[in-house]
Image (cartoon, helix red, strand yellow):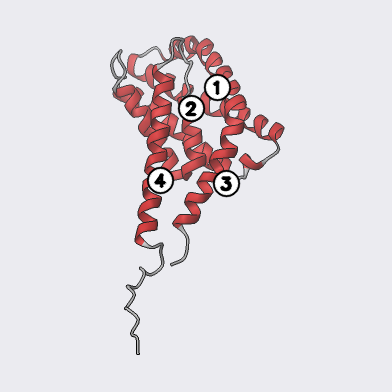
Amino acid sequence: MRVSPARSPRPPGGVPPITAQSNRSRRLAYAALLVALGLTGAYAESIPNFESLTLMAFCAGVLLGLRDGALVAGMTMLLFTLLNPYGPAPPLVMLAQVLGNGLSGVGGALFARLSGPRWPVPVRAAALIVAAIILTALYDLMTNVATGLVFGQMRTWLVAGIPFSLWHIAFNAVLFAVLGTPLTAVLVRYGERLSASSSSPA
């Protein structure tokens, strides 16, 4: 009589170790790629407020979910301001930058939860334009208020920042519509695969 070799039990209530490790590796790889893309776009800028950090932060939320998306978005901004060739921003301004960019990651996660990436293209593009306007305006407001608190003359900083903020909002609205519309549709599928592998039964 042939005796079958004993099989090692799978861990209760989760994915097998190899699958779980593979899933973590994929999430880290995606996170690293988004950080690299965000920093590349930020350091390539030659015009003030011409940046891709906001879109990459939003995409991080779509792909990785609320918690990890916000973390990746905040970390990308933190690295950007710490490694800025002009020197890091004052701590309070840096905090506003990190939190403001983190909000874009949260926005991307909420957009994915509302099934925004699966909406018809015109509706998705319009929603992304609205998201870009709101998130960029919040970021600029937070950083301008922080700058006013650090250097004084709050009203002067807020008024002087209006033209730059309007350009920033307009550029991001176009970027979200043109690149964000196809990107979110693709990234949400990869995000669903990550979620499925994380919650697959033993």
Q: Amino acid at mark 4?
A: Arg
Mark 4 neighbour class, 10 Å CA radius: few under 14, some 14 to 19, many 20 or more: few
Residue 17 percent coordinates (x, y): 34, 60
Q: Nearer the viewer, residue 181 or 140?
A: 181
Marks 3 and 2, Cα distance to the nearest angstrom?
19 Å
Kindly indicate whether the residue at mark 4 contacts the one at mark 2 (C-beta within 8 angstroms).
no
Q: Nearer the viewer, residue 109 or 184?
A: 184
For residue 198, which quarter of the picture? bottom left
- The residue that appears at 52% across and 37% down in the rendered structure is 107
Give the vertical position of 199 relative to 4 (above or below).
above
Marks 4 and 1, Cα distance to the nearest angstrom?
28 Å
Is 110 on the left-hand or right-hand side of 151? Answer: right
Mark nearer the N terminus (1 vs 3): 3
Residue 32 percent coordinates (x, y): 37, 36
Q: Nearer the viewer, residue 86 or 200?
A: 200
Marks 1 and 2, Cα distance to the nearest angstrom?
8 Å
Q: Residue furthest front?
A: 1
> Mark 2 sits on what residue?
54
- The residue that appears at 37% across and 42% down in the rendered structure is 28
> Mark 1 sits on what residue?
172
In the rendered image, is residue 16 in sight? yes
> Mark 3 sits on what residue?
113
